[in-house]
Image: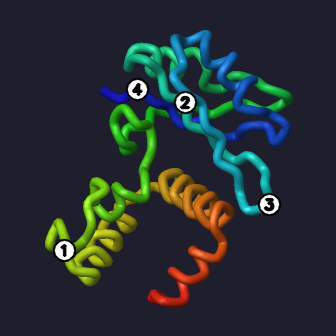
Amino acid sequence: LIRSVIVNNIPYTANEEQLQEIFEAAGHVVSFRLVKNPDGQTRLGQCEFRDAAAAEEAVIRLNKYEMNGRELKVERATNWDKGAGGTSLSQLTGSSGSSSAQSGTTAASQMEAITQRIETMTATQMYQVMGQLRAIVDKNKDQAKKLLTEHPH
């Protein structure tokens, strides 16, 4: 069962601690993550609960909850990774940390798998993946530049 919800229409001034406190009203929160757009403004969040019942309660109780003049939009994370609460980059490639040589997959088949996965993603999922990519670039710009120049397509 899904233990996570996606939160849209978050006020730009909100932080993870404030949102986690609000979502604790639905049940025990394991984590709350904010995803920001390139301008650094918060656009959506993901809240993982200890159990699926709390996630369902959050949808019921907190959808349209007003925070700083904005109505939060809370929805089930039905297409997201069960338990982890998000689409990760490893999910896109279908890898579990093993190298390509170990799994026997080729670069072409990995690209095909990524392409097929992207075609089925919702806008919310795509936005989260873009946020993860940005975090990777921010942490190691030189490595990201090298990766992108070596693999332009």
Q: Quadrant of residue 38?
A: bottom right
The residue closer to the viewer here, 58 or 18, is: 18
Within-10-Å neighbours for mark 1: few <14, some 14–19, many 20+: few
Q: Amino acid at mark 1?
A: Thr
Q: Quadrant of the C terminus?
A: bottom left
The residue indicated by pointer 3 is 39
The alpha-carbon separation of the residues under discs 4 and 2 comes to 8 Å
What residue does disc 2 label? 47
Q: Are the residues tagged 4 and 3 within 8 Å (C-beta)? A: no
18, above or below 45, in the image: above
Amino acid marked by disc 3? Asp
Residue depicted at 28% across the width and 74% down the height: 110
The amino acid beneath tag 2 is: Cys
Three-letter code, disc 4: Arg
> In the shown orientation, is residue 96 left or right of residue 47?
left
Lower position in the chain sequence, tag 4 or tag 2: 4
Describe the element under mark 4 as helix, strand or loop.
Answer: loop
Of all residues, the one furthest to the left in this rendering is 104
Q: How is the image coloured?
A: rainbow
In space, the residues marked 4 and 1 are separated at their CA atoms by 32 Å
- Which label was assigned to residue 3? 4
Q: Nearer the viewer, mark 4 or mark 1?
A: 1
